[in-house]
Image: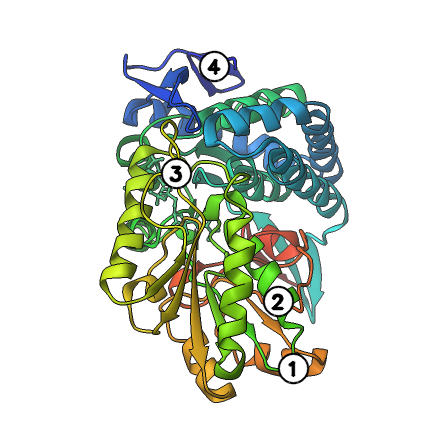
Amino acid sequence: MKAHDGLYIDGAWRPAEGQDVIEVVNPADEQVIGRVPAGTALDVDTAVRAARAALPAWAATPPAERAARLAALRDVLAARKDEIAETVTAELGAPPQFAQTVHAGVPIAVAGTYAELAATHSFEEKVGNSTVLHEPIGVVGAITPWNYPLHQIVAKVAPALAAGCTLVLKPAEDTPLTAQLFAEAVHEAGVPAGVFNLVTGLGTVAGQALAEHPGVDLVSFTGSTAVGRQIGAVAGAAVKRVALELGGKSANVILPSADLAKAVNVGVANVMSNSGQTCSAWTRMLVHSDQYDEAVELATAAAAKYGERIGPVVSAKHQARVRGYIEKGISEGARLVVGGPESPREKGWFVSPTVFADVTPEITIAQEEIFGPVLTILRYEDEEDALRIANGTVYGLAGAVWAGDEAEAVAFARRMDTGQVDINGGRFNPLAPFGGYKQSGVGRELGAHGLTEYLQTKSLQF
Ligand code: NAP
Ligand code: MG
C-alpha cells in the first residue's frame, strides 16, 4: 500500500506545514500499513485558497468538458478497481469480494452517472419572462466518514465537479489511503490544478478548520449526528449552505402476508454486510407477534452463517463501542440469541454477528445507532403498532417493507418518516436521492437531486 507523505493541493503533492502524522492500521491484523500527514488549519487555508483561485475557470468550463473529465475519472477508477478494493480491504477490513463489488464497484457507477448528468443536465431554464441560471455554489468543504470510504467521497466530489464547484476534501482519519488513491485518479483524469484538493487530518483539527473556513461556501458532511449538529450550527451562524448525511436506525417491516424466510434472510444480510457499518442498515426488524418465534429462529440461523465470513470493524475504539451496546442490550433485558460481546478472535477488531430478540421499542439498542453487526427484532400486534414503532426514533434514513402484495407494501411505505424504503427487497439505485428525514440529515445525495445540492439559482428578467 503506497502512502503519500504530502497533501494534494493545487495539482501537486506538497508537504504539510506541521510534522504530525496519522498511522493507518489494518483492523484485521492490527498492523500499521502506512502514515499520512495530519493537516492543520494552515494546510486547510492553503487548500481553500487553491480551490477559490481555481473556481472562476472551472465554473466557466462548459458542462460538456466537465462531463469529459468525469468520464475520464470513472475510467481511471475502473482501471484501478483492484487497487481500490485492496486498499479498502487493508484499511477498513472489508472482505475482498465485498470490497470489489461494493466499495469499488458502486463509486465507479456513481462517477459514471455524474459524467452523464453533467452532460445532460439543464443548467438554464425559462420561467415566464425569466431565464433561471443554475450556477455552482462555489468552494465546497467535504468531510467524509470511513464506512464506505470511496463511495462517500465520490458521492460529494462527482456532483460538485459536475456542477462547476471546486473542493477541499477532509476524509476520515481511519481511511486516508483510499482518499489518496482517489486524488491520484482525479489528477490522472486531467482535472485542472486546484479544482480538487485533499487535506488528510483529524476531524477536530482539519475537519473543524474546514467547516469554519470563511472561504468555504458549502459544507457537505457525512458522519455522526453529534458532529453534524455542530457543523450545522457553525454553518448556520455563518449563513452558508450545509448538507448533512447522518446516522440511522432503519426499520425492516415484515407484514404478515410477506415471504417471511426471504424477508428475514435478506434483512439479516443487510445488517451484517460491511460488519454492520452502514448508515442505512435495517437494524430493527419488525415482525408480527404470530410470526415472531419463527422469525427469531430464522434470523438466528442466518446470523450464525456470517460468523466466519464477517470482516472486522474499523478500529479498537469502535469495537469497544459496539461491544458496549451489546452489553447494554443484555443489561436492559433484551434476549441475546446469537453472538455477544466477547471478541471472537485473538487478533483484529472483530465482533460476532449478534441478534437480540424480545427487544422493546424504548430500550437503548432499539433507539441508538450501534454501527456494528447487531440486529434487534421487535414484535408488533397490528399495522398501526408497526407504524408507530417504525417511526419511533429520532432517525429517518432508510427502511424496508415486505408484503405479499406490492401495493400493500407501498401503502405502508408512504406512511414511514424516512428518506428511502426498499419494497420487497428492491435493489440499490445509484440515481435515486439518498438522505434523511428528521435527524438523519439535511439534503440529498446521488442522481439529479445530488447535483442540485451544489447549484444556486440566478434569475434574469426580460
Ligand atoms: P464522525 O466521527 O462524525 O466523523 C465523520 C467525519 O467528520 C470524519 O472525517 C471525522 O474526522 C470528521 N469530524 C469529526 N469531528 C469533527 C469536527 N468536530 N468537525 C469537523 N469534522 C469532524 O463519524 P464516524 O465515526 O467517522 O462515522 C460513523 C457515523 O457516521 C455513524 O453515526 C453513521 O451513521 C454516520 N454515517 C452516515 C452516513 C450517511 O450517509 N447518512 C454515511 C456514513 C456514516 P475523523 O475521522 O478524524 O474523526
Ligand atoms: Mg470519528
- Of the numbered discs in the image, which one, if any, rests on residue 212? none
Residues at marks 1 and 3, CA–CA distance in whole angstroms: 37 Å
Q: Which residue is mark 3?
A: 344
Mark 2 / mark 3, whichever is N-terminal: 2
Q: Mark 1 sits on what residue?
A: 257
Marks 3 and 1: in contact by CB < 8 Å?
no
Amino acid type for the residue under numbered disc 3: Pro
Left-right relation of 317 to 156: left
Residue 273 drawn at (x, y percent): 54, 47
Number of the label disc, if any, that sits on residue 263: 2
The residue drawn where x is 39% and y is 25% is 200
* 455 vs 440: above or below: above
Q: In terms of sequence position, does the residue under pointer 1 or pointer 2 come before the other?
A: 1
Q: Circles 1 and 2: CB distance less than 8 Å?
A: no
> Left or right: where does residue 124 sit relative to residue 459?
right
Location of residue 42 (image quadrant): top left
Callout in the foreground (3, 4): 3
Quadrant in which the C terminus is drawn: bottom right
Q: At label 1, which amino acid type do we have?
A: Ser
Q: Which residue is mark 4?
A: 3
Colour scheme employed for the rendering of this structure: rainbow
Residue 419 at least partly seen: no
Mark found first going from the N terminus, 1 or 4:
4
Type of amino acid under label 4 = Ala
Disc 2 vs disc 3: Cβ atoms closer than 8 Å?
A: no
- Residue 4 image point, x, y percent: 47, 13
